[in-house]
């Protein structure tokens, strides 16, 4: 996963929930500019570096909706987590 893919997920989730960027920014307690940059895949020092570090350490960033409870449980079981 990369910053652009995260941005697309965020935009899709916001639109699915019926929020404008301004409404979502207020709800999420972030600025409209930040949300816009995120949705457009602009890497910030934090997100870009985190994704890069994880990738170079051999990890894959995966985002799973909380609604997928069974899948989350199965993954956690495989990883030996509770």
Image (cartoon, rainbow, N blue to C red):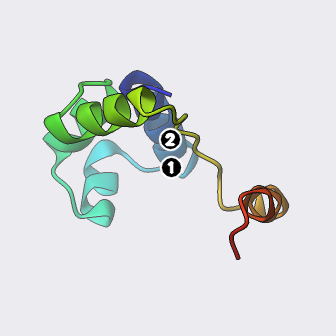
Identity of the residue furthest to the bottom in this view = 82
Q: Is residue 53 above or below residue 20?
A: above
Disc assigned to residue 66: none
Where is residue 67 shown, x and y percent of the image?
Answer: 72, 61
Q: Residues within 10 Å of mark 2 (few under 14, many from 20)?
A: few
Left or right: where 20 falls relative to 49: right
Instruction: Identify the residue position indicated by label 2 in the image.
Output: 15
The quarter holding residue 35 reads top left
Task: Give SS at disc 2.
Answer: helix
Nearest the viewer among 61 and 24 is 61
Q: Which residue is mark 1?
A: 18
**Neighbourhood count class around disc 1 (C-alpha, 10 Å): few under 14, some 14–19, many 20 upward:** few
**Residue plotted at (70% across, 76% down):** 82
Viewed as shown, does residue 47 lie left or right of 32?
right
Q: What percent of the width, then of the height, locates residue 58?
A: 50, 31
Q: Separation of disc 1 and disc 2 at Cα? A: 5 Å
* Left/right of residue 73 with respect to residue 8 in the rendered view: right
Q: Position of residue 68 (x, y in %)?
A: 76, 57
SS of the residue under disc 1 = loop
Instruction: Work out whether residue 71 or residue 50 is closer to the camera in this orientation and state it.
Output: 50
Question: Looking at the picture, does residue 16 appear above or below residue 43?
Answer: below
Identify the residue at horizontal 31%, vertical 24% (top origin): 40
* Number of marks in the rendered image: 2
Residue at 42% over, 34% down: 57
Residue 10 placement: quadrant: top left
Q: Do the residues under discs 1 and 2 have CB atoms within 8 angstroms?
A: yes
Place of residue 56 in the rendered image (x, y in percent of width and height, measured from the top left): 40, 27
The residue shown at (46%, 46%) is 14
Q: Establish if 81 lies above or below 10.
A: below
């Amino acid at each position: 996963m990369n910053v652009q893919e995260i941005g697309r997920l965020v935009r899709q989730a916001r639109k699915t929930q019926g929020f404008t960027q301004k409404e979502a920014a207020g709800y999420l307690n972030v600025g409209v500019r930040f949300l816009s940059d995120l949705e457009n895949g602009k890497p910030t020092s934090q997100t870009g570096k985190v994704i890069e570090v994880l990738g170079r350490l051999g990890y894959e960033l995966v985002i799973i909706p909380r609604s997928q409870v069974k899948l989350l449980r199965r993954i956690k079981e495989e990883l030996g987590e509770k």
